[in-house]
Every structure is written in structure tokens, then in C-alpha cells.
Image: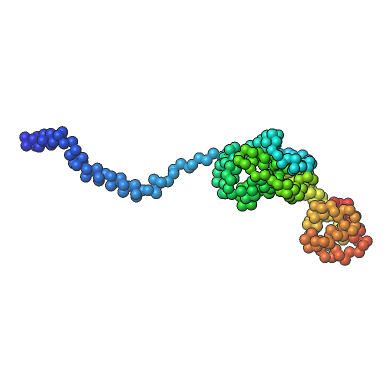
Amino acid sequence: MEELKKIISDFIKNLKENPGTIFGFLYPYILTIIVIIGLYYVANIGDIAINKTSAFVPDTTVIADLPVVQARTVPPVDIFKMKDPTDELIQKGKELYTTNCASCHNETGAGGGPAAVGMNPAPRNFTSPDGWKNGKTLSAIYTTLEEGIEGSSMISYNFLTPADRISIAHYIRKEFMPNPPVDTDDDLSALNSLYNLSAGMELPAQIPVSTAMEILSLENAQKTIRLEDALKTIDSNRSIYSVSLFKSIVDNEKLALSSMINSDTWRSGETAFTDFVTVNIGQNGFSPKVNYLSDADRNLLFSYLKQIL
């Protein structure tokens, strides 16, 4: 017993004098624990790598319908009078650039705007002198805004007026380009001829898609009612000669009546009626027998169909 106490006492004394010996004493145990943890990790690496919680991606999509736009005539522009960047043109161009271009090209013109993420190729860096597909002149930038650039995210901005596009081009050149190249008179004349700038343009009216869909649905519903009424009328007038005549020259009554409901060209006269029913025989519900109608029968059939439709 005394001997054991002496051994323990000597061991503790040795540790106090040489603390580093405890690491040597514990090293095999520490190494064993590390190896066990490593083997457990490797065996379960598949489960450990799995993300147990689905990533949350906020939905920032904003679905906006088309605004109502009245039909209007855009006055002609004189490109030669607008070739110099006046303060008014620059201010207008800045407003239009901020609204239409900055989301991709950034307010600095260097690209990398918030909407540019994932675009390949990336939006143009206006401050760089390299890689301009159409060039840096006023007429070249106008061409890009008019046509867009195929194979890229640069769409056509021909929904803007010519004056607006000229304003944007001036702003880009003035704000982001040191010493932008100047157009020659021939360049400006070619631009004017290519896009007929001096003649003005007609912008059609625009309505929201939802409104257009409602109108189409209503029109289709009305056409369906007209078709059902016409079929009922024909069914209730079986003994009338005009009905027998109609049934004898159609392969599909519904298709024949639908084609006539969807077009009013045949209503203008007997000749127009004849042309309408004979042009697309086999596709418009009428059969080739329509070609053998006498003039009297054709006129009688025309009057009857015009009455019920």
C-alpha cells in the first residue's frame, strides 16, 4: 500500500515538474476518439450534407398588366435639328433612361443593374469603349433602340417615340462616354431614310390583356348563342325548302354555320356569299355540292342564312 502511494506521489510530482508528459500519456486516447469521430462522419456524410430545411426564396415577382394607351399620331422628327444634345434632350433622356434602362445597365451606365443577374451576355457597359455591336454614334445607338440586339437580352424599344429614343441616345453619350464619335450628315440621312423619321408614325391603341380576354370571352359567348339559335331555327323548319337545300350542301352543319358567324364578308351580296362558301370547301363545313346549286337556289339559300344568322 505504501508502495502504491509512493508511485502515485512520484507520478504527480513528475507531472508538476514536466506538464508536457500528460499529453504523451493522453495522446493514444485522443487519437482514438478523433478516428472514431472521423469514421462516423464519413459513414453518414450523405445524411449530414442534406439540408433538412428548404431554402426560402421570397417571391418578388410583380405581375403588371398593360396600361390603357390611346391611339395617337407621333409627329415627324427632324434628326438634323435633334443631332445636338440640348439640356432639354438630356433631361428627357435621363428620365427615360432611369425608367427603362437603369435596371439592367445600372444608373452608372457600367452594367450590373439589379435586373442583370443571370443575363448572358451581360448588359452593355456604356463606359467601356469596346464591344459595341452597332457603334457609339447617335444613329448607331438609335438603331439598337429601334431593333434590339439579336441573341441578347437587349429588346427593341420601338414602343417609345423616335424623339424619346433620340433623347436616350443623347443621354447615354453625354453621361457615360468620353469624347463620343460624331455622326456625319450621311449617317443621319441614312437613319432618317431607314426608319422614315421625317414622316412620323401611327401608334395603335393598347388595352390591358385582362380586358382583351374579357372582350374575347364575351364575343365568343355571343357567337355560341347565335350558333345555338340558328341550329334550333333550322331544326324547327325542317319542312322549308331552304332548310333542305342547306342540309344537302353541307358536311357539317355546326362548322358551316360557325364559319359564317365568324365572318361577315359573305353578307355583302350573293357573289360574296358564293365566293365564301366555295373557297375553302371541306374546311368550312360545306361540301363540293355547293358548286352545283342553281342561281335561284343559291339566292334563296343566301337570303335564308342571312335571315337566321
> Horizontally, is 1 left or right of 252 in the view?
left
Residue 254 at x, y = what percent?
Answer: 78, 56
Q: Quadrant of residue 178?
A: top right
On screen, residue 270 above or below 119 = below
- In this view, the residue in front, 62 or 127, is 127
**Which quadrant would the N terminus be assigned to in this image?**
top left
Number of numbered discs overlaid on the protein picture: 0
> At 15% from the left edge and 33% from the top edge, which residue is drawn?
16
> Horizontally, is 3 left or right of 32 in the view?
left
> Horizontally, is 41 left or right of 117 in the view?
left
> At 86% from the left edge and 65% from the top edge, which residue is drawn?
291
Q: Indicate the colouring scheme.
A: rainbow
Is residue 1 among the parts visible in the rendering?
A: no
Q: Please, which residue is most extreme toward the right here?
A: 296
Residue 217 at x, y = what percent?
Answer: 74, 45
Q: Quadrant of residue 48?
A: top left
Residue 290 at x, y = what percent?
Answer: 85, 63
> At 37% from the left edge and 48% from the top edge, which residue is drawn?
45
Is residue 178 among the parts visible in the rendering?
A: yes
> At 91% from the left edge and 64% from the top edge, which residue is drawn?
294
- In this view, the residue in front, 255 or 192, is 192
Q: Quadrant of residue 303?
A: bottom right
